[in-house]
Image: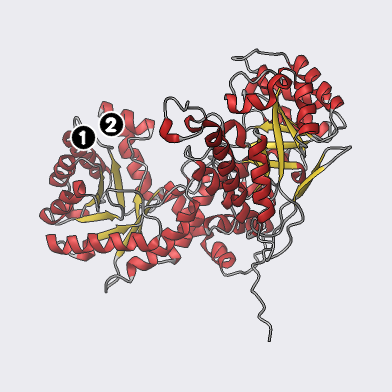
Amino acid sequence: MLIIGEKLSIIAKRVREAMLNKDKGPIQEIAAAQWKAGSGMIDANIGPAEDNGEELMQWMVTTIQEAVPLPVCLDTTNFKAVEAGLIVHNNQWGKPLINSTSNDPERFPMLELAVKHNCQIIGLTVGKGGLPADAEERSAIAAEIMGRAMEYGLPLEDLYLDPLVLQIATSQDHALQVIRAVKMFQEMNEPPMKTVVGLSNVSNGCPKHVRPILNKHYFVMLMNAGLTAAIADANEIAEAMKDKPLIDDVLAGRTIDDAARMTETQKTIDVLTGKTLYAHSYLEM
Amino acid sequence: MALAAPAETYPGKVFEVIIGTEKTAVFGGENVLPFHKFDGSVPNRPVIAYEIQDVAPEDWPDTVKNVYGDAASDPVKWAIFCQNELKAEAIALRLIGTHPDRQDRSAEDAAKTVRAVLDAIEVPLIILGSNHVEKDSAVLVAAANAASGCNCIIGKAQEANYKTIAAAAMAQNHKLIAMSELDINLSKQLGILITQMGFDKEKLITDPMCSALGYGIEYTYSVMERIRLAALAQNDAVMQPPMLADIGMYAWKVKESQAAEADLPQWGSLKERGIAWEVVTAGALLLAGAELLIMRHPESVSAVQKFIDEL
């Protein structure tokens, strides 16, 4: 399992300020912490970065790679910023990953970049229209992205399919659909297609104390479905791996000794699989 | 060999709610989807309450105002008219005059109106605020106290004001409407929060928020349908209170029930159009699972009663 450390996002205030002031300290500190906790790649999310995207992405890539011997996941919709980042990326520590292409024609050029610079790319299974309704629609879009990748000359092992994790607080049904999609994507090629998710989006909008609990359980369920990579906080993943045997027991229908943990895990699994309706206080019911 | 029709059964059941004292009204109690009598038990018909207000209904279209005429100038007369002339099963008194943008009537005045109406009628009373979050917490507490012992429905408690309103309803042994804005997860959350205060879930009525035909009714329909499925199929106790569809205030505010014939002759009779809008809105939400309806026009109510008879 590849963990792509997610903490370097422009959405976080501390990171945004560091990006603005070109202050390497916080960026390198966060990257190093993610590396130590087990990340095999670092996500650099600079947002749409319409003004100074190229310069900012180059600064991010070099700043991160000065601190940790890892490849970078270039996370922006700005095509030029991605290319600028790829040029300075140190491939000695692994191929960079572009985040992302999709079925939206505006995102097709990202595929060209991946071919040109011999790197990996995430294919987000959404089109220009609305969100995919279920695993089948995600798979249909995945097939189109795979076809386009081959047409452009991208080896399929360099493509990570992303089924798009949605918020459980508003789109509960999708949690299970994403797990099904991860399984279906793998069956679409031999060797199986690689898969990736933005894990923490599942708990976006949920109360702060509930978020790590949902993330942890969802990660274990996705891992069991064969997930290849996750954009996530490596510390949360370490926690999830520690609890995995226990969560697996409950998933298999066994009773575990710790009654409180049993209840928490059972309720969380029921919410993630759609057996009970999600509410912010679902753990208190 | 006789053919046994397969029945769709569920582990869950909607709570049965009884309101009123002298004359009572009962709704809910079914363990199947709306009107699926062939699958299980549907012990009660949906209840339709006539809406009245604490102040004259100046903002209502003439089609409805003409029905009540002078009776609508006084809530007590209006209530008696609904009970005696229209044979209302229940009355919903909306204290709209307490809204700060309307007459800003005080909680004490509202309480007096509630008491006067209760003294004049035998059928159950539903007491509604003006949907102003802060004002309702004062008005509905006073109203709940004034209606002590009358087994009314108090509403609507929302996420921002449920604590005071639920506490008052609990103290005076009333039923309570919990309203959230067209979101099934927030509806469940509000139910959890209210029951965590010690309020009996079997005394709750869920209002997932109504909307009129052509103005988002599909959202209300979908949320209601999913609430009912969670109650029945998932046996989710927080989702098992009966549901309210507050039809009248939505159906009579849309263009189709208000626009003059002179302006839109192609739309046909204004009166028929308005009534049809209220009837179709009500019919759709009954099918989605509503057990308690609040409506305005007697001809709409008769049509919906006939619709229920035939289902």
Residue B210 showing in the rendered view? no
On the image, the x and y values in percent for residue B93 come to: 72, 27
On the image, the x and y values in percent for residue A187 come to: 33, 71
When the figure is inspected, residue B32 is found, relative to residue B304, above or below; the finding is below
* Mark 1: secondary structure: helix
Name the chain letter of the residue that bears numbered label 2. A
When the figure is inspected, residue B84 is found, relative to residue A91, above or below; the finding is above
Residue B33 showing in the rendered view? yes
Disc tally is: 2
Q: Which residue lies furthest to the bottom in this view?
A: B1
- B22 left or right of A43 in image: right
Q: B191 or B100: which is nearer to us? A: B100
Near mark 1 (Cα within 10 A), the count class, few <14, some 14-19 or many ≥20, is: some
The picture quadrant where one finds residue B111 is top right
On the image, the x and y values in percent for residue B183 come to: 54, 42
On the image, the x and y values in percent for residue B249 come to: 60, 31
Residue A56 disc label: 1
Quadrant containing the N terminus of chain A in the rendered view: bottom left
**Residue at 64% from the left image edge and 67% from the top image edge:** B8
Mark 2 — residue?
Answer: A19
When the figure is inspected, residue B217 is found, relative to residue A143, above or below; the finding is above
Name the chain letter of the residue that bears numbered label 1. A
Q: Do labels 1 and 2 share a chain?
A: yes
- B107 left or right of A186 in image: right
Mark 1 and mark 2 residues within 8 Å of each other at the beta carbon: yes
Q: Distance between the residues labelled 1 and 2?
A: 7 Å
Looking at marks 1 and 2 on the same chain, the residue that comes earlier in the sequence is marked by 2
Q: What residue type is labelled 1?
A: Leu
The picture quadrant where one finds residue B60 is top right
Residue B267 disc label: none
